[in-house]
Image: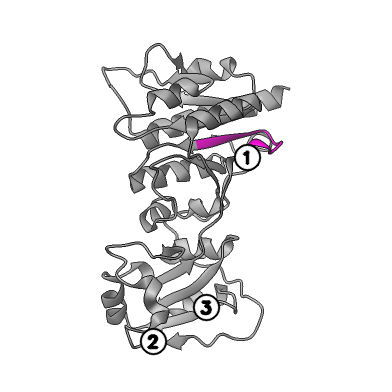
Amino acid sequence: MTNNHSKSVDPPCAFVTPDRHTFSTTRTNGPERLPETIRDLDDPRLSPYRNLRHRETDDGFIAEGSLVVERLLQSDLGIQSVLIHTGRESKYLPLIPSSVPVYLIDRELGKELAGYDFHRGVLAHGSSPTIEPLEKFRDSAQSSLALALVGLSDPENVGSLLRSAAALGVRDILLGPQTISPMTRRVIRVSMASVFRHRFYRFDKPAEQLRDLANAGIASIATLLDDTAIPLIDLPKAIQSDRRVLMVGNEANGLPPEIAEAATHRSTLPMRNNTDSLNVGVASAIFLYELTRSQDADHANG
């Protein structure tokens, strides 16, 4: 796979590989940090981290583990605090801005607080990104491919989709009805924090909004298990617009018929050996790759 996504999509994420849990040694400017040790589990400053095994935090989101926290620190998102196991702070402090509160907690107390022994001894409480109105995406002048998620409730699938999209330079994500928040802890971890690289837009009335996008010259592609739909290999030639939205639906039922019918194009991934379907994350990655590849080829030739 080439990394030539200079015109149609944004460049792939320049993150370290997932199996490297090492931090860079770049230090932040400002006075030396003095983290606070917290020994009282009822301390209100610990509220965002309480009982995470069974719930999401009420305000913002939680990033867990050295790799995910590092990528959060490298992003443009706000960070409200960082919680670290006592004795592990020297690894993390050089990366944390001096304005961000840092709390230390004994490992056993941390396990009692969160409900489990959190990964690599570090959690961060982040501020959720703004979910923009779809009009902001519509009115953007740049050529691009966007991914629309409709009714996806499985965090593993959503995390995988966001990771694939980031790898292929697709930054714009449309969040449809009944789709799990991309800022849940499991989605963030499965995406390997690539979620922090995306721009999110409200896609709460898909059928109506698809017609609005079409009027603005933006093509929409419904992915279907339907032999009458356009085979993926023929799809790029069928689309005239260089602004495109790929829509994927619920893991069990796919896209609702009224949404599929409102799309400008309907496409399918032909399969062999009596295979009836693929996991939504796998199928979507294939669609994304083919669409980005064809856009790059068009720009290279044109």
The residue type indicated by label 2 comes to: Ile
Give the residue at x 36% y 42%.
157
Q: Amino acid at mark 3?
A: Leu
In front: mark 1 or mark 3? Answer: 1
- Tag on residue 181? none
Q: Nearer the viewer, residue 236 or 226?
A: 226
Depth check: give the residue in front, 50 or 293.
50
Give residue 145's position: percent from left, percent from top. Answer: 58, 34
Using the image as rendered, state which of residue 219 and residue 160 is in the foreground. Answer: 219
For the residue labelled by badge 2, is the local secondary structure a helix, a strand or a loop?
A: loop
Which labelled disc corresponds to residue 93? Answer: 3
Question: Contact (CB < 8 A) between labels 1 and 2?
Answer: no
Residue farthest along the right direction in this orientation: 302
Q: Which residues are magenta?
A: 135-147
Tell me whether the residue at label 1 lies in contact with that at label 3, contact meaning CB atoms closer than 8 angstroms.
Answer: no
Q: In the drawing, what numbered circle is on residue 38?
A: 2
* 38 in magenta: no
Please say if 122 is above or below 4: below
The answer, for residue 54, to whether it is visible in the render is yes
Where 178 falls versus 81 (above or below)? above
From the viewer's perspective, is 248 left or right of 98? left
Secondary structure of the residue carrying tag 3 is helix
Q: Kindly tell me whether residue 289 is visible in this rendering.
A: no
Quick one: label 2, few (<14), some, or many (20+) residues within 10 Å? Answer: some
Residue on which disc 1 sits = 135
Q: First in sequence: mark 2 or mark 3? A: 2
